[in-house]
Amino acid sequence: MFKTKIYIFLTFFLTNNFLYGQVGIVDSSSQYFTVFTFDSGATSSYGLLINGKPDGYWMTFYENRNLKSEGNRVNFKLDSTWYFYNENQQLIKTIDYKEDLKNGLTVTYDSIFVISEEYFVDNIKQGINYTFYPNSFKTIKSKIDYINGKEDGYAYYFGKDERVISITEYNKGFIVSKQEINRYNRENKKQGIWKDFYPNWKVKTERTYRNDLLNGYLKYYSIDGQLTKAELYVDGVLQKEEENSVNFQIIPTYNKIGNIIKETTYNTLGEKDGIEKIFSYSGNAIKSVIYKNNQRLLEGGIIDTKGRKQLNWKEFYNNQSIKSEGSYFNNKKIDNWIFYYENGQAEQIGKYNKNGQPIGNWVWYYENGDTLRFEQFRRGIEDGSLIEKTDSGNVISKGVYLDGFKEGEWIYELNDHIEKGLYSYGDKTGEWKHFNKNGNLIFKGNYIQDRPDGKHKWWYSNGKLKEEGSYDYGQKNGTWKKYDINGILKISINYKDGKEYKINGKKIKFNKKKK
């Protein structure tokens, strides 16, 4: 609670200590000028108070005298841009107002960086809204279109390297469809569908990768969305047009009564090169095999008249040992799949939904058959428990995912220590601790949004303090101390805004550059 005092005149002291650094100007000479204070006597806010209502330019403060907010009112209503600060007087938000309602841009900051830009019309979110990755110069995290306060149209989500990684279509706030694109697998190889876009967000190119190699058609589109060109790739090799049409011949094989039982594609060298289809007595395709220069690449399942994989399929290594097996529906993996090492041992086992997205429990194995990792998915996104083990069975990571983000308590067992702590939406949060193999505490520190914050301490294995100091949202601040293995202080360094300014109590002198 704070007391209220009304001043007709503002003293020289107030003018020089409280108006410093403001964006606008408070008319301190007005008879309506009013100052509110905390119980401590520190100013909490001031501006014009007319008939008991604030008007004109107003400023509010924290009890530590740092500016909290400032902005203008017209006819007692919020107007123009208002500025909001944290207790360290760092800008955290700006909001455009008109007649007491949000109208225009609302910008949220993380230290000096913008983390979101939202657009409002009469307090309702409209148009394209952006979020940005923390601690970056406007690296886009998401781009979402709003109509009347609800997501409507296409929303684009981006990786930290600025590639689009997901597209979600909304209709009045409800998800219509979602597609993950431009993804890497766990071996950091391109996998699945990749797309590039024009500035108007029409697709420019679309292609499919399997383990970093182009497989399928590379499609080119005009800026108005028309398909202009398509090139076929198999295992990263462009299949020239003449090789796919003029120089290829499909030869049927018939049974004794004249029904077709097989169609085989040959190149000019007489080699099987392309799709070979096997038909049932009634004329239905029951099996398909793909060849490249007489080398069988895949077998099992059906390729329909549109060239789409259907039903049960098997994929093989070059030595003809089985690589994977499962079912397709319209070229998408569905239901249960097993992937193998070349020695025949299962590498991973899991399930896909009707949209070709991993779902449910997935298990990865080492070549010796021991479990490597257990993970759960929902609609292609990590969601649920994860346990990862060494080949000797020791747990090396354990935790829970929620909608693709690490959430709650996680444990990591690294080469020489164990880490324990909490995540919130994929960011480290709260207290984290590290222990050595003997269970002794060797580190303790707090995190906010993945940044170290507050007191951090490290210990030697003998329990003696090794180092201690404080962070302020990712930056070292205050006194940091380092000790030798016997606990004797070796060095003391003072930081301000992440920069050293004292070592062992002595100020650091910086040589000024000569002009």
Image (cartoon, grey):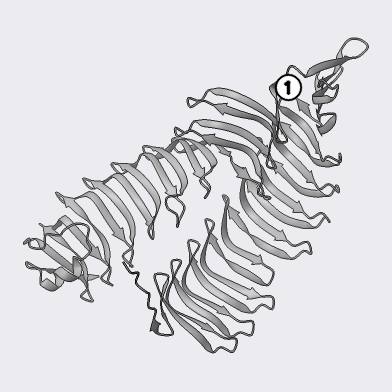
Q: Is residue 177 above or below residue 510?
A: above
Tag 1 residue? 244
> Residue 2 appears at what percent x and percent y?
22, 70
Q: Quadrant of residue 29?
A: bottom left
Q: Residues within 10 Å of mark 1 (few under 14, many from 20)?
A: some
Q: Tag 1's secondary structure?
A: helix
Name the residue nearer the viewer: 295 or 339: 295
Asked whether 341 or 356 is in front, the reply is 341
Q: Is residue 336 left or right of residue 355?
A: right
> Residue 137: where, in percent of width, then height?
42, 53
Residue that appears at 10% across and 71% down = 11
What percent of the width, then of the height, locates residue 210? Answer: 69, 39
Q: Quadrant of residue 165 in the image?
A: top right
Identified by mark 1, the residue type is Asn
- Give the left or right position of residue 498, taking residue 427 as reference: left
For the view shown, which residue lies furthest in the right direction? Answer: 256
Residue furthest to the top: 257
Q: Is residue 322 left or right of residue 473?
A: right
Q: What's the residue at 19%, 68% (across, down)? A: 18
Point out the image quarter for the C terminus.
Answer: bottom left
| Viewer-side residue, 150 vs 134 | 134
Q: Measured from the top left, where is residue 457 in percent x and y?
A: 53, 77
The image quadrant that residue 498 belongs to is: bottom left
What residue is shown at x 49% (from left), y 82% (from top)?
Answer: 481
- Vertical side of 123 occupied by 261: above or below: above
- Residue 4 appears in view: no
| Whether residue 266 is visible | yes
For the N terminus, give its image quadrant: bottom left
